[in-house]
Amino acid sequence: MGVTIKDIARHCHVSTSTVSKYINGGKVREKNKIAIDEAIQLYNFKTNAIARGLKTKRSSLVGIVVPTLDSAFFGNIVSGIEALLYKNGFSSIISTFIPGDPVSENRKIEFVLERSVDALVLVPICTKRLDLEGITIPIILIDRVIDDFACDSVTPNNIEIVEKATSKIIEAGHKRIALVNGFDNITPFRDRLKGYYSAFDKHNLPIIKEYISFGEASVSEAYKMMNRLLELRVPPTAVIGANSSLSLGVLLSIKEHGLLIPEDISFIGFDCYDLAIVYRPLLTTIEQDIQQICENVVGLLLRRLQKSDSSPKESIVLKATLIEGNSVAQING
Amino acid sequence: MGVTIKDIARHCHVSTSTVSKYINGGKVREKNKIAIDEAIQLYNFKTNAIARGLKTKRSSLVGIVVPTLDSAFFGNIVSGIEALLYKNGFSSIISTFIPGDPVSENRKIEFVLERSVDALVLVPICTKRLDLEGITIPIILIDRVIDDFACDSVTPNNIEIVEKATSKIIEAGHKRIALVNGFDNITPFRDRLKGYYSAFDKHNLPIIKEYISFGEASVSEAYKMMNRLLELRVPPTAVIGANSSLSLGVLLSIKEHGLLIPEDISFIGFDCYDLAIVYRPLLTTIEQDIQQICENVVGLLLRRLQKSDSSPKESIVLKATLIEGNSVAQING
DNA sequence: CTGTTAGCGCATTCAA
DNA sequence: TTGAATGCGCTAACAG
């Protein structure tokens, strides 16, 4: 704390600009180079990122705004992105918000922006086009996009993968398949619904709307949704949880009702790998490759940060995987 | 981007210091107040936290350095702390490191420090006293302390709660109780081991060292440790996982061996609530109150940040809870 | 209550 | 290559 380039300049009998230049990789006379290195060690000098930022207008800070980190999914995303950014000299400012509260979400984005971050990584929930319109730094959206707003994004192939999962259940003989979904004004849930529809279409099976449930993507809401589904006069024989929290809530409800998977009800989850592998039986789930997501996000980010890059916005779609467990049973009729 | 107090000062025909004062809550003539507010709206002015930090020597940034966020436990901690800090005007810089790699851990701490953070929240793994000695900003340790280093900390009552859990298993008739533990040079694992010992002592039961396993606190290592334990000539009849990752690894191994809980083996976990409540059967686990941890950490932090506070270091010990499930069976002999 | 002045630590002209 | 001078945007003294 407190030792500046001025101190080390004085110590070496050179000017601050020489020190500054050297620190930033400039060429300096060999003698000075040695002296400066020595002084830096001696005083334990660290460049003051704040002062540097003020001057250069670049903070080497990236804002990461996500819903609460209570699911391992976002936790892994954040730590993956942070690790990659670190390798490139960036620090990560993190900010979580209350899912479903647009005010909290916007405030958190503003708050991060005030820190002069160089870029913003965002998992939007309520964020609208208008909220982001005026922002001049690069923005990368993860997991979901915003309607009518051209923005870089990294998302999974929701439609395709959910169609595949649904088809798997249909082909096991199920007709009453529940989907415990988030609100379909959020793009991934809308797309997952589309995938579900599409599977029914392809198999010429009628959609039973009663089995499609929309709600906030939280454990507790999913729990309630699934309770309602199980208490229908003719309950479903299979269920898909549309993300990790929803999957967890569904499992809770199934458990509460004393039902067995897959004997009483078949199940496919989403982004719940940790749980899937220790559950009895092994759960069939849709999983995203988090490392791949992070690499794409940071790669895109770094490209955007090169001033020269003004190429059109990219929508990177990553393939999710259907991991086979034993939670889907064959049934007749 | 780019509008400064100078712009709004000019617009209002006042000096920048008047604007600055108003922004920081100072008293200003009513007329000016209105004009400034208006101009701020008009130009969409945001105070530049970087410039402010350069001047005030306070960045309103708190560094949070934790191992990877892949367990929901740390994720929840981080998001809890972030939320509380936000309410107090602080941003959170997060940094994760590779557990078990002292170099990575130290580098990450350095990296965060270079950002001129006002305080540091740390979950140390390899960090030694020497690494932290020269740091002048407040440091709060979570989950574990560092030998011979007086530092503020918030930890659970490890000895007591593990003694309670172990006693519960002993009183159910078990004698061969495994402990899948982290390395005992890390204080929580050392203390959890003490609690385990203590329970055996109190019940006048001999410790069987064979059943105590030490390793890195990761899922995969725990999996291997438990595999070895289960392949002993006389395997344990019960097992305690000493943290969330270890618990998960233990469960995986049990599953791989086709054993049933609690029929074949009894189990008590640690910090794995999400899993515990959906597992069949309900798992008995030791749980920390994360909200309480966060409140204590941030409370202590804010006190330390008040320049006047130079009171002695505090070691806050929070009570963990033993949550009763159905994973511990009564046995004879 | 307000404006003038000065400077935080650093990076960047430009002249030497 | 080097150094003197300048200013990033803001806050803190001080004098008015």
Image (tube, coloured by chain):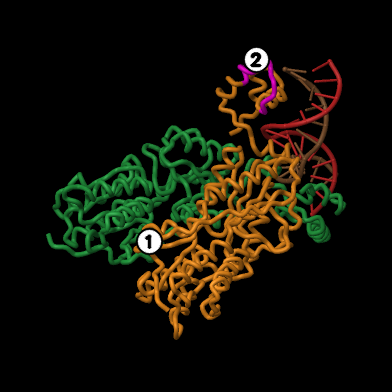
Chain colours: A orange, B green, C red, D brown
x, y (%) of residue B308? 54, 45
Residue A282 is tagged as 1
Do pointers 2 and 1 mark residues of a single chain? yes
| Label 2 to label 1: alpha-carbon separation | 64 Å
- Callout 1: SS: loop
Which one is nearer the viewer's eye here, B53 or A306?
Answer: A306
x, y (%) of residue A262? 37, 70
Q: How packed is label 2: few (under 14 Cα within 10 Å), some, or many (20 or more)?
A: few
Which quadrant of the view contains residue A13? top right
Look at 35% across and 43% down and name the residue there.
B216
Which one is nearer the viewer's eye here, B220 or B116?
Answer: B220
Query: Relative to A163, does residue A62 appear above or below in the rendering?
Result: above
**In which chain is the residue bearing label 1?**
A
> Callout 1, which amino acid?
Leu
Say which of marks 2 and 1 sits in front.
1
- Callout 2: SS: helix
x, y (%) of residue B269? 32, 57
x, y (%) of residue B287? 37, 59
**In which chain is the residue bearing label 2?**
A
Q: Earlier in the sequence, mark 2 or mark 1?
A: 2
> Callout 2, which amino acid?
Glu
Q: Magenta stretch: give its range.
A: A24-36
Instruction: List the single residue furthest toward the left.
Output: B333
